[in-house]
Image (cartoon, rainbow, N blue to C red):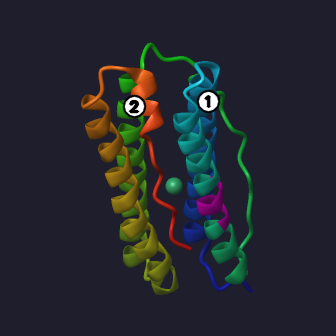
């Protein structure tokens, strides 16, 4: 018998898809930078993709720990081309805001159907999203200070993720 309800299981499974799709989006962005030899930005987005994969696995572990079932959905092809750096940075922030909304919906659902065991995991993600949005905003702010893309790239630093 699963400890997790079908409803929560299904909702978390959907979120695994969102996290994997996030990784897919950032991998495309990393390529765009790599093609232009903006290597630090390429690294930043590659690492971001890895983090998204880790998020998906965090949800997977939780589902399995609670006796649920994991199903990996098919990933859709994502955008692969942009006209400039700012377009990518803004798309990144918008995407993280979208994910924050998804996490909030999960939190509301867990409360509504009394899935209290899922709340600590979702609180972790709520905190994580504060960081994700802050990282994206920081990149946008810093980019505004540079006239040259390579100069900006040279100064991109990534805070090491906790955990
Ligand atoms: Mg994520």
Q: Nearer the viewer, residue 86 or 70?
A: 86
- The secondary structure that most of the magenta stretch takes on is helix
Seen at 46% across and 24% down, the residue is: 150
| 25 vs 138, nearest the viewer | 138
- Which label sits in the foreground, 2 or 1? 2
Tell me the quarter of the picture where residue 60 sits.
bottom right
Residue 142 vs residue 79: left or right?
A: left
Can residue 46 be seen from the camera position used here? yes
What residue is at 36 percent from the left and 68 percent from the top? 108
> Magenta segment, which residues?
53-57
Distance CA(mark 2)–CA(mark 1): 20 Å
Can you give x and y, in whole percent of width and height, for residue 97 in the image? 35, 47
Indicate whether 46 appears above or below 151: below
Q: Which residue is mark 1?
A: 28
* Badge 1 density bin: few <14, some 14–19, many ≥20, Cα 10 Å: many
**Mark 2 in CB contact with mark 1 (< 8 angstroms):** no
Q: Is residue 79 above or below residue 14?
A: above
Tag of residue 152: 2
Instruction: Give me the residue at 25% from left, 30% from top.
Output: 144
Q: Position of residue 73 (x, y in %)?
A: 71, 47
């Amino acid at each position: 018998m699963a400890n997790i309800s079908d409803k929560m299981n299904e909702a978390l499974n959907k979120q695994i898809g969102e996290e994997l799709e996030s990784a897919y989006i950032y991998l495309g962005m990393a390529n765009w930078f790599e093609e232009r030899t903006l290597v630090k930005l390429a690294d930043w987005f590659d690492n971001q993709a890895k983090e998204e994969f880790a998020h998906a696995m965090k949800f997977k572990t939780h589902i399995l720990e609670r006796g649920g079932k994991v199903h990996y959905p098919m990933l859709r092809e994502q955008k692969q081309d942009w006209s400039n750096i700012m377009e990518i940075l803004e798309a990144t922030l918008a995407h993280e805001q979208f994910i924050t909304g998804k996490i909030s919906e999960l939190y509301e659902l867990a409360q509504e159907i009394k899935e209290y065991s899922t709340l600590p995991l979702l609180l972790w993600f709520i905190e994580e999203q504060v960081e994700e949005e802050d990282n994206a905003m920081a990149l946008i702010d810093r980019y505004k200070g540079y006239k040259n893309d390579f100069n900006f790239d040279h100064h991109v630093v990534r805070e090491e993720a906790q955990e």
